[in-house]
Amino acid sequence: MEPEWWRSFFDRTYTRLWSAAGFFDHGTAEIEGIQQLLRAHLGTDVGLRILDVPCGFGRHSFALHKAGHHVTGLDLSADQLAMATQDHPGPVYVRGDMRTPPAGPFDAVLNLFSSIGYFCDDAEEVRALQAWHDVLVPGGLLVIETNHRDRIAVIHSPGEELPVGATGAVELGTMDWATGIMHRRVRLADGQERPFTLRVYAATELIALVRRAGFDDVTVTGGWDGAPLGPQTRLVLTARRPR
């Protein structure tokens, strides 16, 4: 397993590659979905104190700031935060580990784009979730948008190389079905390889972790449109800090 791979993986090369592959092209639908959830759960979609963790280069933070929210973006990558500050100014950007967020308080915490499971250790994931719980106001909302184990079983075949768009890069590696950990690497067009490991949770496992961290009113759907969760869909989870 690559220890603490996330400390170096999310640099400018990552952003250029994922952007060229079109992975960041659904921002409008994502923000509309987030706004709908905020309105449904918190009674408003403007003026909320939001923590975006990890925020990356600020694409969600910036859009939510423009929509009238008070946004704090937290990320460990100096490269991501430099791009966020330059290209997506307005939110407050903070460098730090997702397990030690700013004190808040926040009305909502967002964890988007498959950004849970980095630690490959349930205790550390719960530590992060508990930290997010503690900086939320009573009744505050957690939103997680991620992949899930049943979908991985459908879209990943053993030994398959997955093109990263039309960039010439491919993603390859293995899935350990006993642990739920993906051992993957991205092979760039020039032959360089960038490894990463990720714990991919089944919906039931993720729900249990979120509840273990102190949240209640946990629900999952198959996307921002509220469709049912299924093996072909991604996963959107919402949960509340008890009042």
Image: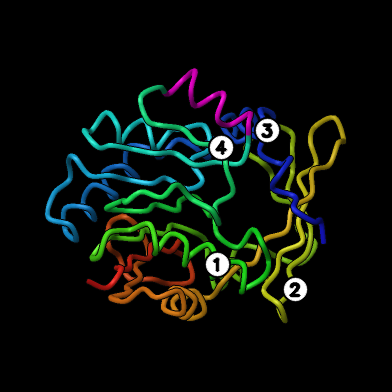
Circle 3: element type: loop
Q: Main secondary structure of the magenta part?
A: helix
How much space separates mark 1 and mark 4, taking CA atoms?
Answer: 18 Å
Q: Is residue 187 above or below residue 120?
A: above
The amino acid pointed to by label 3 is Asp
Residue 156, horizontal then vertical, whole percent = 66, 63
Viewer-nearest of discs 3 and 2 = 3
Residue topped by disc 1 = 127
Disc 1 crowd rating (10 Å Cα; few below 14, some 14-19, many 20+) is: some
Where does label 4 land, which residue?
Answer: 95
Q: Position of residue 201 (x, y in %)?
A: 56, 72
Residue at x-position 71% and y-position 64%:
182
Which is nearer the N-term, disc 4 or disc 2? 4
Mark 2 belongs to which amino acid? Asp
In this picture, which residue range is highlighted in magenta? 78-88
Indicate left or right for 32 with 188 as reference.
Answer: left
Asked whether the residues under the numbered discs 4 and 2 touch, taking CB atoms below 8 Å apart as contact, a structural biologist would say no
Q: What quarter of the picture does the C terminus occupy?
A: bottom left
Local crowd size for mark 4, using a 10 Å CA cut-off: few (<14), some (14–19), many (≥20): some
Amino acid carrying mark 1 in the image: Arg
Location of residue 87 in the rendering, given as x and y in whole percent from the top left corner? 47, 19
Alpha-carbon span between mark 4 and mark 3:
14 Å
Circle 1 SS class: helix
Residue matched to label 2: 176
Which of the marked residues, 2 or 1, is nearer the chain's N terminus?
A: 1
Amino acid type of the residue that numbered disc 4 sits on in the rendered structure: Arg
Report which residue position mark 3 lands on.
Answer: 11
Q: Is residue 116 left or right of residue 108?
A: right
Pick whichever, 65 or 14, lies toward us: 65
- SS at mark 4? strand
